[in-house]
Every structure is written in C-alpha cells, then in structure tokens.
Amino acid sequence: MASLQDIRRRITSVRNTRKITKALELVAGARLRRAQTRIEEMRPYADRMQELMVGTAREASSFRNLPLMQRREETRVGVVVVTGDRGLAGPFNGQVLRRAFAFEREEREAGHEVVWTVVGRKGGSTLRFRRYDVAAHWEGFVEKPTYHDAQAVAHKLAEMYTAEEVDRVVVVFNRYVSPLVQRVTTTDLLPIPEHVLEGKEDEDAKAQAMRGDFIYEPEPEDILMRLLPVYLETEIYRALLESAASFLAAQMTAMRNASKNANELIDRYTLQMNRARQAAITQEILEVVAGADALTA
C-alpha cells in the first residue's frame, strides 16, 4: 500500500493536471464560438457559389478549354488529409487518418497510386513515421485558417492536376455538426464533380426561379474559367473552417472529460489517504496501549 506521502504527491500531481485541462477546456470553448460563427457564415457563401457554377455551366457549350474539368483515366489519386497541429483533441486526428488510410487501401486495390498531401503537423508527422512520401505539407494555420491559406493549398492542387501529376484529388476532413459530433467527410475536389455542375435534382422552387434567362458577358466558358479556381479555393476554405471548428469542439470535449476523470481520481486518492491516515492513527493508539499494558504488568 502506498504511503501517505506518496498519495499526497499523487493528489498534487492530478490537481495540477486538472488546472491545465480546465484551462484548455475554457480556451477551446471560447474559440469554438468564434469558429462556429465563421463556418455558419461560410456555408451560405459556398452554397451560393455552387449555384452560380451550376447556372453558368448549363449555358456553356464546351468545357474543352477548362483544365480543371478535364477528366482522364485515373492512375494517380491525390489525397488531401486535413488534421490538426496539436493533439489533446480526442479522436480528432486519428479518425481522419484512419479514413485516409482506408481510402488508400481501396485505391491501391483498384490499381491506383496514391499521392499524399497533408494539412496539419499531426498528419505530416504520422505520414513521415509510416515512411510515406508527402508531395505537399502545410501547417501553422489549422486552428485559425484564412482565405489566403486556402488559396495556397488550392493553387498547389490545381498545379498538380493541370501538370497531370494526379488524375483526381480528394480531401478528407472532419465536418463540424455540433460540439459533440464531428463527422469524417471525403469529398472530390478535382476534376470538378459532375453533380456540382449539373445541380441537385431536388432543387426547390426558389432555386428554379433564380435560373431565369440571363445574357452572359463575356461568354459562359470565360466566366467558368475564372469561377473554377475560386470554387476550388472556396471548397478548401470551407474544409479548413469545418476542420478548425471540429478540432476546437473535440478538444473542448476531451478536456472536459479529462477534468471529470481528474476529479474522480482526486476523490479516490483522497479516500485512500484518509484510510491510510486512519490506519496510522489506529496503529499508534495500539502501540500506546500495548506500551501502557507492558508497564503495568
């Protein structure tokens, strides 16, 4: 059984750890509210961008001069894994990497080569530890991404696709649902998915009315040439914002659970300390009584 001094030392250590986890929980909670506001403001813009793409693509007569829409036989698939720069966020990083590795196995079984690109320090270190070759790596902005960061990622992916280094690009990230729920999502980025340009079959009446009869100046193909890079940047920016909000939510939940476990551990150690102290007191009383009996005998 541990001594009183050991138990006191453990209680002090757990209390110090609880201070850290509680502080991280409060910081993550405050930052999550701002991140949640950013992603809620971003989603309508991204949806509107998609509607604009749909309307313009319907009027275009040819996609021949649009390199980001050229489809070719898939031999090399680029995977963009969006992770965090730090840990202490529960399953946030692990579940994205597991989905990415599962996707890699599926592609290799289909005879495709996988080209890795990664956002976040944790994803990069994991891939390097497994001895994967990483074509591009970005870090330092995962928790608070800007549109400029999304542009840097988008330009690199577009360059790889137009240079035929990859024939398809897929992004894997955590989509924010609520502070307790973050879902791993796999989305095709390049070539621009056909369902994006064709629109959804179940469009509501408002979307139908927004089509109208427009005159395009310049030609729809020229407009698409400018819209496609912006659409790619927007989709990546959305993934970065979703991942940032998911990271803060996962960290807040993980630190809350850690603080709760620390409280339970402190209660357990306190009970052990009281029992050990009571046993020590009882032992001292028995020794005093035994000594008094020996003197009177």
Image: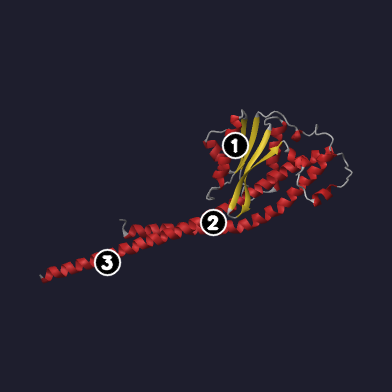
**Tag 2's secondary structure?**
helix
Residue 297 in percent (x, y) is at 10, 70
The answer to the question of whether label 1 and label 2 lie on touching residues, with beta carbons closer than 8 A, is no
Distance from the alpha carbon under mark 1 to that under mark 2: 33 Å
Distance from the alpha carbon under mark 2 to that under mark 3: 40 Å
Crowdedness of circle 3 by 10 Å Cα count: few (<14), some, many (20+)?
few
Closer to the observer: label 1 or label 2? 1
The answer to the question of whether label 1 and label 3 lie on touching residues, with beta carbons closer than 8 A, is no
Relative to 49, say whether 69 is above or below: above
Residue 83 in sight from this viewpoint: yes
Crowdedness of circle 1 by 10 Å Cα count: few (<14), some, many (20+)?
some
Which kind of residue does numbered mark 3 sit on? Ile
Q: Which residue is mark 2?
A: 24
Residue 284 in percent (x, y) is at 23, 66
Ranked by sequence position, the earlier of labels 1 and 2 is 2
Task: Give the left or right position of residue 83, taking residue 153 as reference.
Answer: left
Which kind of residue does numbered mark 2 sit on? Leu
Task: Give the left or right position of residue 108, taking residue 148 as reference.
Answer: left
Q: What coloring was used for the rendering?
A: secondary structure
Residue 16 marker: none
